[in-house]
Amino acid sequence: MSHQARIDSVTATLAKPSRDVEFAKKNGRLQPVSEIFGENVFTFQEMSKHLPKSVFRSFMKQLQGNCTLDKVTADAIAHAVKVWALERGATDFTHWFQPLNDSTAEKHDSFLTLKSSFANGFGEVTAIDTFSGSQLLQSEPDASSFPSGGMRTTFEARGYTVWDTKSPMFIQDGPHGTAILYIPSVFISYNGEALDEKSVLLRSSEILTKTALDVLRLIEPTDDEDRPRVKKVVNTLGIEQEFFLIDRALYTLRPDLKITGRTLVGALPPRHQQLEDHYFGKLPTRVLAAISECEYELAKLGVPIKTRHNEVAPAQYEMAPIFEESMLAVDHNLLTMDVLHRVAHRHKLKALFHEKPFRGVNGSGKHCNWSLSTDCGDNLLEPSATPETNYRFLLFLLAVLKGLLDHGDLLRAGVASASNDHRLGAHEAPPGIISVFLGTQLNEVLNSIEENRPVNDDIVGGNKMTYVRVKGTVLDIKVSSLPSISRDLTDRNRTSPFAFTGNKFEFRAVGSKQSVSFPVTLLNSVVASALQEIRDALKKQMGDKKVASTEDQLVVIREFIKKTKAIRFEGDNYSQEWIEEAAKRGLPNITKSSDAFSRILKTENADMLKRLGVFTEAELQSRYHILMEKYAKDVTIEAQTLSTMVQQQILPSAFSYRRNLAEAGSFMNDIGVDNAPEKQLLQELGPVVGQLQQRTSELNTLMNDMNNLTETTEMGIFAANKLIPAMEAVRAQADYLERVVADNLWSLPKYNELFLNM
Ligand code: ADP
Ligand code: MG
């Protein structure tokens, strides 16, 4: 197909009318989101309506971890959900799980069963819809084609998906008014090893919340207080999702975007994000249509999207939900990406989740807002009006600091990938050094306790109440007609990879494309481990007492403030001074993912994860291999794509231009006109084109060399140290040519065309 024919074909396909989704209306007006929220979810409420009381009660007991799910209960739930789903047009069901590839997997099974009857002597077949308790609880997809990092050679290929009872089932609309019942599940091997992201997240969250409860038991007086006794702690998570939306027709013409998710070549236009006019700017109409439709679909699935806005880079946006319990938040983030991808398609847009689709403008992250809550509704990271005497808050705060200090490199490994490397440390995103930002006020509180002196009121704002996030101090706007407003005293520090933001921590280094399951699993684990230390330190200090006195707590708090000083950093994380300072403090600076993965296997990290029961040795080995292999494959695919694009598109464009110039020059010579300009340009182009050809052939040689490697680690290191620099060298020449070759001969859509809202 010629280039023009290709463009014509894309244009024709996209010219067909898009299928608009009917928003539900009541009396001719759009229904409020609160009314459609969760309408496609088989919530616990919905379940209680459909089940006999005794069955529902035994399910609830199982949920609280008090017993296993028996067959009678499972059968009753299966029947109830089948009736509910059939009423909504469901034809199929699927276990929905999260294999180790940052996406979700599903295999549809229809409810259809054939029943033979020989009642009248003839074999007669009747079609019925069935769904049994055992089908609900477990299914067996072939595990052999999912990444297992070598666990399959040690264990059987069999894998099971098992319903995660904590995450409610839901239906997703299919074509022609049909629907599919989704059963959120974990995916484990024949021997119970995790083959997925979710099982380990659940394990980490269990050990974290259990240890948090242990600590609370030591410091909170029991029943006799006004406050009810905490029975349960939950791990809360709010995931902000950044992404780009670009025109799908143009996307289709960029092999690099299609194959690798990012542009491998592309010159920055003169205007991009320098004027800072995109952040919080008006959403383009087409984009708003797609995002609001996406939010509407998500609301039906019970995903509580709360905010949307234009991000810093052109064509970049963000959606953020109301926080939820961690595993539900993760499920919902994966659904958000999935629904956005599909809705964007309907609007002839393409959602790019890659961390760095375009060089030279900001990349995308997925900020994980993280905290712990009690069943009484208290946020354990809420500083309150007087954090300096809020020992419970301080103990939990210090657990986070200690966890990060001891295992910062592990968290760095949790966000490592070939794609996130282009973002981390690229002066817009947190660098490879993990540190924690607390804000001036909290920092002063910790310093004052450490130095055993009163809090310096000048530093904290002169008013103890200023810690309260919403009450804050009153800001003078100097306009009498405006209402007085409060301000937060935890300032923001955008450069920190891990920041305290008022009453939660925000882990900012997480990549936009990855599942947050793994980083959050690691975060939960390192904090659980530190909480165990704090628990043990309290016990030691308490001696025979049942409850730790405030003096006991203060001793432990002071001890941990001293121990964790090195992880606190309030300055500019992008500065050269910080790199030097961090080295002095002994904080690791891991700039390349290929160097980060092995931190998973480092003794201190691996022992901790095994001791907590979050990972087994085999699971850790498997993780390492999967991550390193994926890294090597990602880079190799990019290298191959780049080489092909240069040979099939970029060099031919340059050759055509040279030919045009040469023909023009020679023609002018024939008619006696000065051809110096054409000649000069040709002479300038020659060496660049030659360099491009040369660099590309070097890249090809390296790819051949890489074929001789067999060991995963070797391949990953080779990809990082050889292929990536070689690709850089190719790109430099290609981007130069993009700036000088005639536009009508350039076959790749350019950045200024891809940036929809420029
Ligand atoms: P900021 O403006 O500091 O980023 P927002 O209030 O906009 O803070 O919250 C950002 C995200 O953090 C949202 O998804 C929100 O639901 C989530 N969040 C707020 N409180 C908590 C919490 N206690 N635990 C987990 N996530 C939270
Ligand atoms: Mg935020």
Image: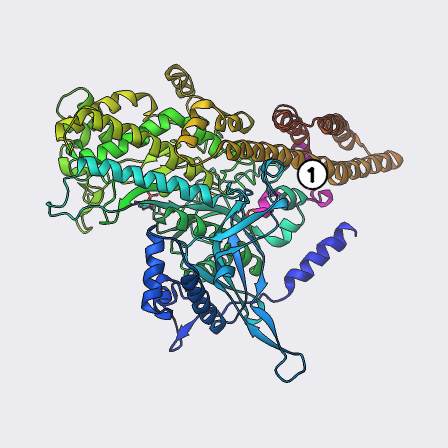
Residue placed under numbered mark 1 in the picture: 641
| Residue 221, image quadrant | top left
Relative side of 358 to 184, left or right: right
Query: Is disc 1 placed on a helix, strand or loop?
Result: helix
Q: Residue at x 21, y 28 (%)?
A: 539
Q: Is residue 503 above or below residue 168?
A: above
> Which residue is at the front of the view, 267 or 161?
161
> Which residue is at the front of the view, 493 or 717?
717
Q: Residue at x 36, y 62 (%)?
A: 44
Toward the top, the furthest residue is 584
Residue 316 is situated, as x and y percent measured from the top left of the image, at 49, 46
Query: Magenta span has 751?
Result: yes
Toward the bottom, the furthest residue is 120
> Which residue is at the front of the view, 418 or 601?
601
Q: Is residue 25 above or below residue 272?
A: below
> Which residue is at the front of the view, 415 or 746?
415
Mark 1 nearby-residue class (10 Å; few <14, some 14–19, many ≥20): some
Q: Quadrant of ligand 2?
A: top left
| Residue 719, image quadrant | top right
Q: Residue at x 38, y 62 (%)?
A: 43
Q: Amino acid at mark 1?
A: Thr
Instruction: Give the main secondary structure of the magenta stretch.
Output: helix
Total marks shown come to: 1
Q: Is residue 390 above or below residue 104?
A: above
| Residue 561, image quadrant | top left
**Residue range corresponding to the magenta coloring:** 736-754
Toward the right, the furthest residue is 670
Residue 151 is situated, as x and y percent measured from the top left of the image, at 58, 37
Query: Magenta span has 752?
Result: yes
Q: How is the image coloured?
A: rainbow
Residue 638 is situated, as x and y percent measured from the top left of the image, at 65, 36
Relative side of 6 to 482, left or right: right
